[in-house]
Amino acid sequence: MRMTRRLAFAATFSILSAVAGASLAADKIVIGVEAAYPPFNNLEADGTLVGFDIDIAKALCAEMKAECTFVPQDWDGMIPALQAKKFDAIVSSMSITPERKEKVDFTDKYYNTPPAIAVPKDSAITTATEEGFDGKVLGAQSSTTHSNYAEAHMKKAELKLYPTTEEYKLDLVNGRIDGAIDDVVVLSEWLKTADGACCKLLGTLPVDPVINGAGAGIAIRKGDALREKFNTAIAAIRANGEYKKINEKYFPFDVYGD
């Protein structure tokens, strides 16, 4: 299954990357997405992109009457690829943080959920705190707000970083790490699956505004007028009920947050 996903990813990338340069026209927008962060974005075995991010992006493009194309991109290279003009915008659950705002501009948020920690069901760890993970191994996806949070607030734990969420989940299932930190929705949805049946949600974590930011927004290149077009579209789908319809497709609660 893992090999099938990688082949599908490669095939999709090779097709979509051919159109990635055709971007700056108002009615043509190329969107970068990680495609490996369910339920927000994921790549099916047949190469279909699915998830909350994808549906929100499609709704925004429809509102802007724009022709949008999606390009899968590894998370670590997401901002460099945007700056290199491989695509025009990132719609991939990217948190709006001061550090990232030095490199790119962001739209208003389109959702905001807190970080959390998951552990095996038989774990002796009882609290999602630094003390609770003293001497334990905590997994996180690299180059994320969650890995940054662990480095800042879980210093007594040994932090193990992974390129994708799939890899830390595999290690958690097989007992190679004691817990994993990620978005509460990502962990909660995974726990409902057969693979996630091993584990439980230990608890959510206090939000650090500097590290976690002000929610997930759409990243665009510095000074690009596309920012305001997306902002207008975000406000529109919030007002006309399209956002609510997409939200209810994926979640039994409002992910927009405060």
Image (cartoon, helix red, strand yellow):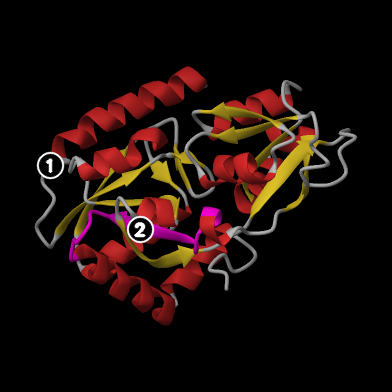
Q: Quadrant of residue 204?
A: bottom right
Label 1 sits on a secondary structure element that is loop
Q: For the point 18% across and 66% down, which residue is it?
A: 225
Q: Quadrant of residue 190?
A: top right
Q: Earlier in the sequence, mark 1 or mark 2?
A: 1
Write down the residue under mark 2. Answer: 218
Classify mark 2: residues with Cα within 10 Å, few (<14), some (14-19) or many (20+): many
Q: Is residue 153 magenta?
A: no
Label 2 sits on a secondary structure element that is strand
Three-letter amino acid code at disc 2?
Ile
Whether residue 114 is visible here, answered yes or no, is yes
Q: Is residue 216 magenta?
A: yes
Q: How many marks?
A: 2
Write down the residue under mark 1. Answer: 21
Q: Residue furthest bottom?
A: 239
Q: Position of residue 121 (x, y in %)?
A: 84, 36
Q: Position of residue 111 (x, y in %)?
A: 50, 63
Residue 84: which disc? none
Relative to residue 228, is residue 204 drawn left or right? Answer: right
Q: For the point 29% across and 26% down, which residue is it?
A: 11
- In this view of the protein, which residue sits in the foreground, 109 or 10? 109
Q: For the point 76% across and 22% down, which residue is it?
A: 175
Classify mark 1: residues with Cα within 10 Å, few (<14), some (14-19) or many (20+): some
- The magenta region covers 211-225
Looking at the image, is mark 1 or mark 2 nearer the viewer?
2
| The C terminus: image quadrant | bottom right
Q: Does residue 160 sit above or below 88 in this rendering?
A: above
Q: Does residue 66 sit above or below 84 in this rendering?
A: below
Three-letter amino acid code at disc 1?
Gly
